[in-house]
Image (cartoon, grey):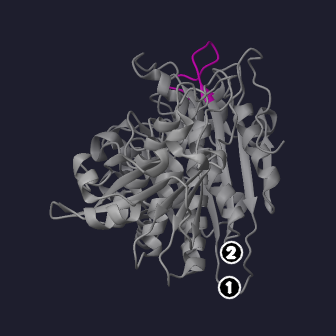
C-alpha cells in the first residue's frame, strides 16, 4: 500500500503508520443543524464581542460571561448548547491572521481532549451530539473573511490535533472534518481553493513530523529512504530513486560514507524528481532542494552529552521537510521543475567511525579536514550539494538542516535562520515563510570569516573556529558552485517541548510548507 512503512531492520519493532491521517477542512455555504459548532470571539482592546458569538451559538450572553469567555487569542471555552450538545467559543484576539492559526490549533486540541485520547473510553458521545457519527465540527467564518485568514485557520485546525504514536492499538477517535461555514455572498470557490492549498501545506508539515518523530530503532537510512519512496507511489509525476552504499562508494560520496561508517546500518541517498507542469517558455526555473537526513546522531567519537540525546532521532528534520514538501509540490501540480536530494546516514560510534583529524574527499573532489565528528550534517550535505551542481545544473539551490546549536542561541526555538548568497533569493524564502505561517530571520554571510574555512592539510576545514552557524554556512557555500543558494538552519524550530499555535510537542515539521510556498511563488 502506498505510504506503508517497509519492514524495519529490527524485526521486533512496532512500525509507525505513516502518513498520519489529518483532519480534513472544507469551506461550505450552510450552517448545519445538529452539528457540533464553534464560533470566533474577537477581543478588541479588552472588550470581547459576546453578543455576536452568543447569537451564532444560540445562547445568551450571560452564559458566555458565566464561562469567562474573554476572546483572548487561543482561549477556548466549551459551551453547553440545546439538546445536550456542545459548542465552543474560540478567542481570536484582535483578529490578525496569525491569531487564527493559534485559535485553530487550540480548538483542535480542545476537541481531541473532549473526545478522549485513549480509544474513547470514558468519553460521553453525547458531548458532540448525534453528528459524532459523521465526525463533523463546523466553524462560523466572519463576514468579509480573507483567504489569508482561512489559510491560517485551516493550518491551525489541521495540525493542532496532530498526534504521533507507535502502537499496535487502534488509532484514537478523532473529528475527521471541520467545516468552515462562509457568510452569504462570500466567494466560496476561492475560499475553498485557499483551504485546499493550506491543507496541502499541513500535509507536508505532517509528513515531516511523522518521519522525524519515528524512533531510530526503526528509522535506519534504508527505512527512511524506502518509506519516502513508497509515499511517492500514489502521487502522479513524482519519481523516487534510492541509492545504496555501493553506489555511493562508486560515485565518491566520501562525506556520506565517512559519517555513516560507524553504523551497522549503511547510508543512502534519496533523489526525488518533479518535472513540473509548466513549459520551457514560462520562465520557470529548475530548483534543487537538499535536506539533511541524519537518522540518529550520537555525535560519533565527539560524543554528545546523554541528556537530550533521545531527540537526535529528529536530526533528519530538514530531510523530512524536503520530502513532505515534494509530495505537496507534486499534488498541487506546481509549474516549477524541482529535484530533491536527501543524503541519509546514522552517525554512530564504533571501530569504523570516522575520526577528528581525518581528511575526507567529497563527491566534487574537494577535501575536508575533520575537526569534530558531531559536525556531521555539513559533511553529508557537502556531497549532495556538489552532486546537485555537477549533475543537475540547477538555477538555484535551497538546503535545509538542523545544522548548528549556535542557531538556537542566536534565534531561539521558533525562528529559522536564512543564509543566502543572493539577497533576492533570501527575501523570497522569508516571504514564502510569512505567507505559510513560519518565521525566518536573515543571517549574514560575513566575508570577514570566509578565509577561516580554508584548510591547512586539506582544501577546507569542517568545523573552523568562529561563530558556529556562520562557519557552517560558509563551509556549505564552498560546494554550491557559485550558484544562487540559500541555507536554512532550523536547529531551533524543528523541535518543540510543548504545544503552541499549530505546533505540538516533538518534531514540528518546520520549513516544509515554506518550501512549498517558495516553489509556488517562483513563477511570479
Q: Residues within 10 Å of mark 1 (few under 14, many from 20)?
A: few
Residue 507 placement, left or right of 395:
left
Can the viewer see residue 489?
no
Between 14 and 283, which is closer to the camera in this rendering?
A: 14
Q: Is 169 inside the magenta-drawn segment? A: no
Query: Does label 2 or label 1 sit earlier along the sequence?
Result: 1
Location of residue 402 with respect to 46 vertically, above or below: above
Q: Is 353 inside the magenta-drawn segment? A: yes
Location of residue 302 with respect to 132 vertically, above or below: above
Can the viewer see residue 241?
yes
The tag on residue 282 is 1
Q: Residue furthest front?
A: 83
Mark 2 = which residue? 335
Residue 127: image location, x then y, percent? 50, 40
Magenta stretch in the rendered image = 346-358
Q: Residue at x 71, y 18 (%)?
A: 13
Q: Are marks 2 and 1 in contact (CB under 8 Å)?
A: yes
Amino acid at each position: 500500500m502506498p505510504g506503508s512503512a517497509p519492514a524495519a531492520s529490527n524485526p521486533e519493532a512496532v512500525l509507525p503508520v505513516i502518513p498520519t491521517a489529518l483532519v480534513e477542512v472544507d469551506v461550505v455555504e450552510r450552517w448545519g443543524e445538529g452539528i457540533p459548532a464553534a464560533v470566533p470571539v474577537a477581543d478588541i482592546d479588552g472588550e470581547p464581542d459576546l453578543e455576536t458569538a452568543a447569537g451564532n451559538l444560540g445562547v445568551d450572553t450571560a452564559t458566555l460571561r458565566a464561562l469567562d469567555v474573554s476572546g483572548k487569542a487561543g482561549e477556548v471555552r466549551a459551551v453547553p448548547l440545546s439538546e445536550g450538545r456542545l459548542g465552543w467559543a474560540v478567542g481570536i484576539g484582535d483578529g490578525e491572521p496569525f491569531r487564527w492559526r493559534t485559535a485553530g490549533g487550540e480548538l483542535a486540541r480542545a476537541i481531541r481532549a473532549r473526545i478522549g485520547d485513549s480509544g474513547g473510553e470514558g468519553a460521553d458521545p453525547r458531548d458532540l451530539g448525534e453528528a459524532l457519527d459523521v465526525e463533523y465540527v463546523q466553524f462560523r467564518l466572519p463576514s468579509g473573511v480573507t483567504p489569508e485568514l482561512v489559510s491560517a485557520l485551516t493550518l491551525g485546525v489541521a495540525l493542532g490535533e496532530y498526534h504521533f504514536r507507535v502502537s499496535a492499538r487502534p488509532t484514537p477517535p478523532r473529528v475527521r472534518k471541520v467545516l468552515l461555514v462562509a457568510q452569504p455572498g462570500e466567494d466560496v470557490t476561492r475560499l475553498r481553493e485557499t483551504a485546499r492549498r493550506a491543507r496541502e501545506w499541513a500535509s507536508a508539515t505532517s509528513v515531516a513530523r511523522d518521519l522525524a518523530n519515528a524512533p531510530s530503532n526503526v528509522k535506519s537510512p534504508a527505512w527512511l529512504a524506502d518509506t519516502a519512496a513508497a509515499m511517492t507511489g500514489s502521487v502522479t509525476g513524482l519519481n523516487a530513486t534510492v541509492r545504496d552504499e555501493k553506489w555511493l562508494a562508486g560515485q565518491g560520496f566520501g562525506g556520506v560514507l565517512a559519517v555513516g561508517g560507524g553504523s551497522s546500518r549503511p547510508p543512502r541517498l534519496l533523489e526525488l524528481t518533479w518535472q513540473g507542469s509548466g513549459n520551457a517558455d514560462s520562465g520557470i526555473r529548475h530548483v534543487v532542494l537538499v535536506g539533511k537526513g541524519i537518522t540518529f546522531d550520537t555525535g560519533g567519537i565527539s560524543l554528545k552529552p546523554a541528556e537530550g540525546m533521545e531527540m537526535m532521532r529528529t536530526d533528519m528534520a530538514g530531510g523530512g521537510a524536503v520530502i513532505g514538501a515534494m509530495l505537496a509540490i507534486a499534488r498541487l501540480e506546481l509549474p516549477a521543475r524541482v529535484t530533491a536530494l536527501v543524503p541519509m546516514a546514522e552517525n554512530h560510534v564504533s571501530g569504523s567511525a570516522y575520526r577528528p583529524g581525518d581528511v575526507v574527499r567529497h563527491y566534487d573532489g574537494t577535501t575536508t579536514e575533520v575537526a569534530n565528528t558531531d559536525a556531521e550534517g555539513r559533511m553529508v550535505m557537502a556531497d549532495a550539494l556538489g552532486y546537485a551542481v555537477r549533475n543537475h545544473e540547477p538555477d538555484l539551490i535551497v538546503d535545509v538542516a538542523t545544522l548548528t546549536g549556535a542557531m538556537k542561541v542566536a534565534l531561539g526555538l521558533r525562528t529559522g535562520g536564512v543564509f543566502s548568497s543572493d539577497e533576492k533569493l533570501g527575501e523570497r524564502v522569508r516571504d514564502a515563510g510569512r505567507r505559510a505561517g513560519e518565521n525566518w530571520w536573515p543571517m549574514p554571510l560575513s566575508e570577514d570569516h570566509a578565509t577561516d574555512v580554508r584548510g591547512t592539510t586539506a582544501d577546507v576545514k569542517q568545523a573552523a573556529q568562529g561563530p558556529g552557524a556562520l562557519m557552517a554556512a560558509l563551509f556549505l557555500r564552498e560546494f554550491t558552485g557559485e550558484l544562487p543558494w540559500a541555507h536554512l538552519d532550523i536547529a531551533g524550530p524543528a523541535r518543540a517541548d510543548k504545544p503552541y499555535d499549530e505546533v505540538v510537542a516533538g518534531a514540528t515539521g518546520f520549513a516544509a510548507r515554506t518550501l512549498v510556498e517558495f516553489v509556488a511563488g517562483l513563477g511570479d
